[in-house]
Image (cartoon, rainbow, N blue to C red):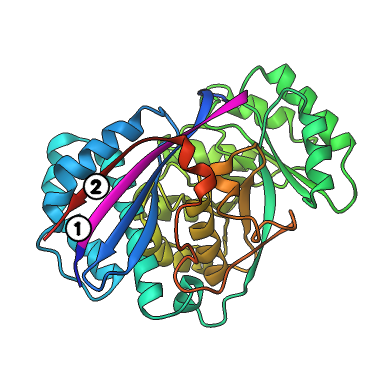
């Protein structure tokens, strides 16, 4: 089969309460969604990561229609993995020449998701059942995106929705961070757990000091305490000092670097992002290695409903012990795709329709389209 038609959409949902992280603020919720057709006239949907900076969505859209489509013209494939290998081979020189590896990896990941969606629809099976015939239709979740301001109120609101695991953003002012950890910890029920996400916000010169200070709290995990690109010796030192296990992976973009992390004993939770790197094709293989090293796969995700659904399919097919990250901030670009799937906050129910189970872009979010482009191929 071949890809014959590509349409891309840039969405932007304006928000009242700014989403903050240790490295920046989100004043709106962007999404870059692709809709592709193959030579059998089957439609597949994919999502390309574009959270930071949100303007990158426009650059990526220009690359898709001005450059990427030229590389798709001669690609014929019988499986998603074959497509993934061929497009990576064709773009290898371009990636080296431009230095834009991350950007192209985001685009390739989104196309890989869309091709898997087509493959599932063509074979009349949901993706998780193609990957693993025994895949569960439910995955466990946790509440993510909890801002430091009014964090306890947010946790209590999440509890009402059925969540029992909560991830707080830290990496700002340490005194405020610790105060919030203490506040939430004191109000947790016996069955509830707290994670914290530093978002790479600590320097290697101070991370050990901060980890020692929060050793007195019982945390499910501490996520990305230092830069993902930090030397492996710093990851080892951080994990040894911390009494709580470490989670990371959303900003790692090659298998060799994942293997180095997997070999560190106290890094337990591995969090690749399906829309940032690898799509299904690469992370399916990574998930096998995660299991081999006795770690737990917990996909990172913070975007629209397409990437969330794709993450759920991959999780359900690969690791029954993992948790799906669910952003709790208002975002119709996510929720309009997942009305039935997220009926109960503690679990995500996976549609058993073919592919991702997505037939069209919901009418309710079309008003948030900033721009769209279409390219015919072949």
- Taking the image as drawn, is residue 301 in sight? no
Q: Compared to 359, does 317 lie above or below?
A: below
Residue at horizontal 46 percent and vertical 49 percent from the top: 273
Question: How far apart are the two marked residues, 2 and 1, measured between alpha carbons?
Answer: 20 Å
* Quadrant (top left/top right/bottom left/bottom right) for the N terminus: bottom left
- Location of residue 194 by image quarter: top right
Q: Which residues are magenta?
A: 4-18
Label 2 secondary element:
strand
* Quadrant (top left/top right/bottom left/bottom right) for the C terminus: bottom left
**Where residue 252 sits: x, y (%)?**
41, 45
Q: Compared to 55, does 247 lie above or below?
A: below
5 falls in the magenta region: yes
Label 1 secondary element:
helix
- Give the mark toward the camera: 2 or 1: 2
85 and 368: which is toward the camera: 368
Residue at horizontal 42 percent and vertical 66 percent from the top: 284
The residue at which mark 1 appears reads as 87
Residue at horizontal 89 percent and vertical 35 percent from the top: 186
Residue at horizontal 61 percent and vertical 45 percent from the top: 246
Magenta span dominant secondary structure: strand
Mark 2 nearby-residue class (10 Å; few <14, some 14–19, many ≥20): some
The residue at which mark 2 appears reads as 374
Q: Compared to 16, does 196 lie above or below?
A: below
Q: Specify which label sits upstream in the sequence, 2 or 1.
A: 1
The image shows a total of numbered marks equal to 2
**Where residue 103 sits: x, y (%)?**
29, 39
**Where residue 319 sits: x, y (%)?**
58, 67
């Amino acid at each position: 089969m071949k890809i014959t038609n590509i349409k891309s959409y840039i969405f932007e949902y304006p928000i009242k309460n700014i989403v903050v992280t240790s490295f920046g603020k989100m004043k709106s919720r962007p999404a870059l969604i692709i809709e592709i057709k193959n030579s059998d006239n089957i439609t597949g949907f994919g999502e390309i990561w574009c959270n930071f900076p949100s303007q990158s969505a426009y650059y990526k859209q220009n690359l898709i229609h001005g450059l990427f489509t030229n590389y798709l013209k001669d690609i014929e494939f019988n499986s998603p993995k074959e497509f993934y290998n061929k497009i990576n081979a064709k773009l290898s020189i371009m990636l080296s020449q431009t230095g834009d590896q991350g950007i192209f990896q985001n685009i390739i990941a989104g196309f890989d998701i869309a091709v898997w969606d087509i493959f599932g629809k063509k074979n009349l099976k949901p993706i998780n059942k193609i990957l693993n015939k025994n895949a569960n239709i439910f995955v466990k979740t946790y509440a993510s995106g909890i801002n430091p301001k009014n964090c306890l109120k947010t946790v209590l609101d999440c509890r009402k929705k059925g969540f029992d695991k909560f991830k707080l953003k830290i990496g700002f002012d340490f005194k405020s961070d610790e105060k919030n950890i203490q506040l939430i910890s004191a109000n947790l029920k016996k069955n509830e757990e707290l994670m914290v996400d530093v978002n790479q916000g600590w320097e290697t010169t101070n991370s050990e000091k901060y980890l020692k200070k929060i050793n007195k709290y019982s945390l499910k995990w501490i996520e990305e305490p230092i830069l993902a690109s930090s030397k492996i010796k710093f990851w080892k030192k951080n994990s040894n000092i911390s009494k709580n296990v470490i989670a990371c992976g959303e900003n790692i973009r090659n298998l060799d670097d994942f293997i180095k992390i997997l070999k560190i004993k106290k890094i337990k939770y591995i969090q690749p992002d399906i829309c940032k790197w690898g799509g299904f094709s690469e992370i399916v293989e990574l998930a096998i290695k995660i299991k081999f090293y006795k770690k737990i796969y917990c996909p990172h995700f913070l975007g629209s409903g397409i990437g969330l659904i794709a993450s759920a399919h991959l999780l359900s097919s690969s690791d029954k012990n993992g948790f799906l990250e669910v952003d709790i901030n208002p975002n119709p670009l996510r929720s309009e795709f997942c009305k039935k799937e997220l009926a109960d906050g503690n679990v995500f129910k996976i549609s058993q329709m073919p592919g991702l189970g997505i037939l069209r872009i919901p009418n309710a979010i079309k008003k948030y389209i900033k721009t769209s482009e279409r390219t015919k191929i072949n």
